[in-house]
Amino acid sequence: MQVLHQIPRLYDPNVIIGYETSDDAAVYKLTDDLAVVQTVDYFTPIVDDPYTFGCISAANALSDIYAMGAKPIMGLNIAGFPVDKLPLDVLVQILQGGSDKAKEAGITIAGGHTIDDNEPKYGMVVTGLVHPEKIITNSDAKPGDVLILTKPIGTGIITTAMKEDIAPIESAEMAIKVMSALNKSSAEAMIKVGVNACTDVTGFGLLGHLYEMVSGSSVGAEISLEKVPIIDGTWKLADDLIIPAGTMRNHEYLVEHIIWDDISYEHQMILCDAQTSGGLLISVPEEKSGELVRLLQESNALASAIIGRITENNVGIIKVKKLIG
Ligand code: CO
Ligand code: CO
Ligand code: CO
């Protein structure tokens, strides 16, 4: 929600990225060579298994640091837990999942805070570091850039089906694999190649986050449905109208900003599907795109798909075609 825009903020010239451009994390410049990047994310359980929930939530929180081209250095846990309703071991498993994911990212969890709450909630504050001139924002995409996505989409629809026990087992397993995966090596690949813009795909869905990128960058975009990696089984669930409320809100919000070229309702929903811990959406100069795809494949990214390109015309508009050349 964008409520923060309604509250006046104290101006600080060292806050070089705040919330104005809807970027992934805030950035505070300490010196000419060093900036701190900070983000916080937490949510209610998205899967039944507490350990897996902890892994996913930590991967999701870390993702905003990776999307900025920064290196995470430390995390703090934030948790809510119904102490009188659930055995404390459930909380231990959630925190263990978060801790193992942080370890995989190479950072320590240095502390945190838990409160008594009606429903479990878990997430992390993550701090990272970056050179102030090497920050990768979501608002510097350039006409001619190629758009690359590093994970398949569909986790919102599939986790909604999982809650109703109607998700095919392979789809559920793939969604968990996708949500638990760190964006670490994909971020390292994009830093190595040098890209113009990046964001991670989360609650606003692929098209919602792409819209933030094109409007922030004053460009347009064209994407090809057939090039977008989608988790197997997602379309069938969308066809059965298993669509999360957040996904429908995204679709409604984006109505004026998208030109749908003969795209079915189900596919429109999938492209707007609210993701948890999704991949990086990267805007890279065309001449570097082959190298980025190669590095992503080498690092076993879950996807390395060229899904479209940035255009000079149609500023703030995304054209979705079945296939573009
Ligand atoms: Co983000
Ligand atoms: Co976030
Ligand atoms: Co405290």
Image (cartoon, helix red, strand yellow):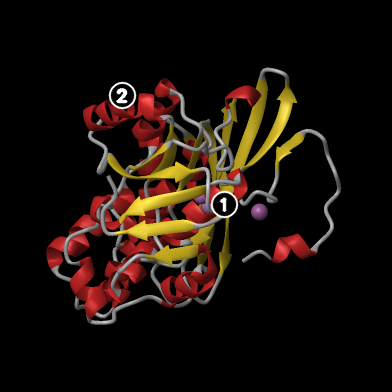
Give the mark nearer the N terminus: 1 vs 2: 2
Query: For this view, does 206 lie left or right of residue 37?
Result: left
Tell me the element at label 1: loop
Q: Residue at x 65, y 49 (%)?
A: 21
Residue 92 visible here:
no
Place of residue 137 in the rendered image (x, y in percent of width and height, measured from the top left): 57, 38
Residue 225 visible here:
yes
Task: Tell me the quarter of the picture where residue 167 sits.
Answer: bottom left
For this rendering, which residue is in front, 249 or 69?
249
Asked if 10 appears above or below 31 in the picture, the reply is below
Is label 1 in contact with label 2 (beta carbons under 8 Å)? no
Mark 1, other Cα within 10 Å: few <14 / some 14–19 / many ≥20 = some
Q: Residue at x 32, y 58 (%)?
A: 321
Can you say which quadrant of the picture contains the C terminus? Answer: top left
Q: Residue at x 34, y 77 (%)?
A: 243
Q: Residue at x 83, y 39 (%)?
A: 12
Query: For this view, does 123 lie left or right of residue 11?
Result: left
Asked if 292 appears above or below 202 in the picture, the reply is above
Name the residue beneath numbered marker 2: 291
Can you say which quadrant of the picture contains the N terminus? Answer: bottom right
Asked if 285 appears above or below 170 in the picture, the reply is above
Comparing labels 1 and 2, the label whose residue is closer to the camera: 1
Place of residue 300 in the rendered image (x, y in percent of width and height, measured from the top left): 22, 34
| Gap between marks 1 and 2 measured at Cα | 28 Å
Name the residue beneath numbered marker 1: 315
For this rendering, which residue is in front, 6 or 239?
239
Place of residue 252 in the rendered image (x, y in percent of width and height, measured from the top left): 49, 75
Tell me the element at label 2: helix
Mark 2 C-beta to ligand 1 under 8 Å? no
Badge 2 amino acid: Glu
Residue farthest front in this picture: 313
Label drawn at residue 69: none
